[in-house]
Image (cartoon, rainbow, N blue to C red):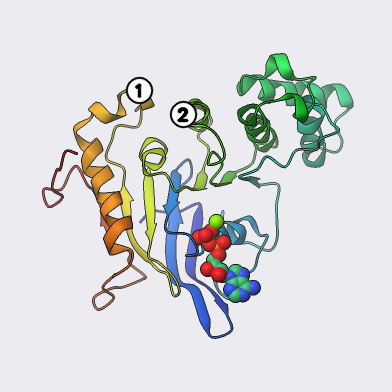
């Protein structure tokens, strides 16, 4: 467990009628930590992210961010959605400057635009600042979404499968950029992904959810790879296949038949594939 966590999720549950989508969730996120959540479709990942964003209420439990209970959406927590959700009639610059204005309503136009441009350049779109969303590729639109989220200098980024609609090449480039930017700015991140390799590249820890209904956190996997990892030589590191196999085995088998007899939801098991000798190495 993280000491003095920035985010603390305590006994979170969501139920519809008599059915729990998930229950007894306890986890923490440290300041500057990158946490990924993996689980099969329908286990409640988006619901958890929405609860963290303050967009949806859980049925039970408490979420503290910076020691305070969440009570609705906040500019302290920026969300990057799967689809970019840009305003089509506005240029890239105006889309980002619009968000900047919501954060700092007192700033004059020149200051807003200069601030917005800084983040547009950070995501490599300096040359496209005057383009409209329709003139951009899918990857570029998603970059604008990232620039917009970062431009309000949130205390936390929430991402719901942000790259899943992109082709593999674009996805890879954006993963690299997000990793670079998040490390540079010591951003605290909670991200949902289906992609095991994406989680290994980006996350410091990976939360594994069992299948619903009644989904729980089965385990929290600590990424034992060095933090300065990059996509090009990830697979050369000896821990890589151990972590990868561990995650895939979970998704294929253990997510379905999780043994709850000795399970204590308040103390999710932390595993360190690659470091512990119990995790067998299996090359594909
Ligand atoms: N109004 C509703 N009534 C009953 N079940 C619902 C309702 N809305 C969502 N759910 C259930 O909540 C579950 C979690 O959804 P979601 O958080 O989107 O999962 P994920 O993002 O992991 O795919 C789904 O299994 C869905 O069936
Ligand atoms: Mg979802």
Quadrant in the rendering for residue 202 = top left
Find residue 98 and report its horizontal and vertical position in percent.
82, 35
Quadrant in the rendering for residue 145 = top right
Q: Is residue 9 left or right of residue 126?
A: left
What is the total number of numbered labels drawn onto the structure image?
2
Asked if residue 283 is positioned above or below residue 249 in the image, the reply reads above
Mark before the other along the chain sequence, 1 or 2: 2
State the SS at label 2: helix
Report the residue marked by disc 2.
172
Does ligand 2 reach within 8 Å of label 2's beta carbon? no
Q: Is residue 157 left or right of residue 179?
A: right
Locate the N terminus by quadrant.
bottom left
Find residue 234 and report its horizontal and vertical position in percent.
30, 29
Report the residue marked by disc 1.
232
Find residue 18 and report its horizontal and vertical position in percent.
54, 86
Front in this rendered view, residue 120 or 197: 197
Residue that extends furthest to the top in the rendered view of this protein: 127
Give the quadrant of ligand 1. Answer: bottom right
Find residue 279 and report its horizontal and vertical position in percent.
15, 50
């Amino acid at each position: 467990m993280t000491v003095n966590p920035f985010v603390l999720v305590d006994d979170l549950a969501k139920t519809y009628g008599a059915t729990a989508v998930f229950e007894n969730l306890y986890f923490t996120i440290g300041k500057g930590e990158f946490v990924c959540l993996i689980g099969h479709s329908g286990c409640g990942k988006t619901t958890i992210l929405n609860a963290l964003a303050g967009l949806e209420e859980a049925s039970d439990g408490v979420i503290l961010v910076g020691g305070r209970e969440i009570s609705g959406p906040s500019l302290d927590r920026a969300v990057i959605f799967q689809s970019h959700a840009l305003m089509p009639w506005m240029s890239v610059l105006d889309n980002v400057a619009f968000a900047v204005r919501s954060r700092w309503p007192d700033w004059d136009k020149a200051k807003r635009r200069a601030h917005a441009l800084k983040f547009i350049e950070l995501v490599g779109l300096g040359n496209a600042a005057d383009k409209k969303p329709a003139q951009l590729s899918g990857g570029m639109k998603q970059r604008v979404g990232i620039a917009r989220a970062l431009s309000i200098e949130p205390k936390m980024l929430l991402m719901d499968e942000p790259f899943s609609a992109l082709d593999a090449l674009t996805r890879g480039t954006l993963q690299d950029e997000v990793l670079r930017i998040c490390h540079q700015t010591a951003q605290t991140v909670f991200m949902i992904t289906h992609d095991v390799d994406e989680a290994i590249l980006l996350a410091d820890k990976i939360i594994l959810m069992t299948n619903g209904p009644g989904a729980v956190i089965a385990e929290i996997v600590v990424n034992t790879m060095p933090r300065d990892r990059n996509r090009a030589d990830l697979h050369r590191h000896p821990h890589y296949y151990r972590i990868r196999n561990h995650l895939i085995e979970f998704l294929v088998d253990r997510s379905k038949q999780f043994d709850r007899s000795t399970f204590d939801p308040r103390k999710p098991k932390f595993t360190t594939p690659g470091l512990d000798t119990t995790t067998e190495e299996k090359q594909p």
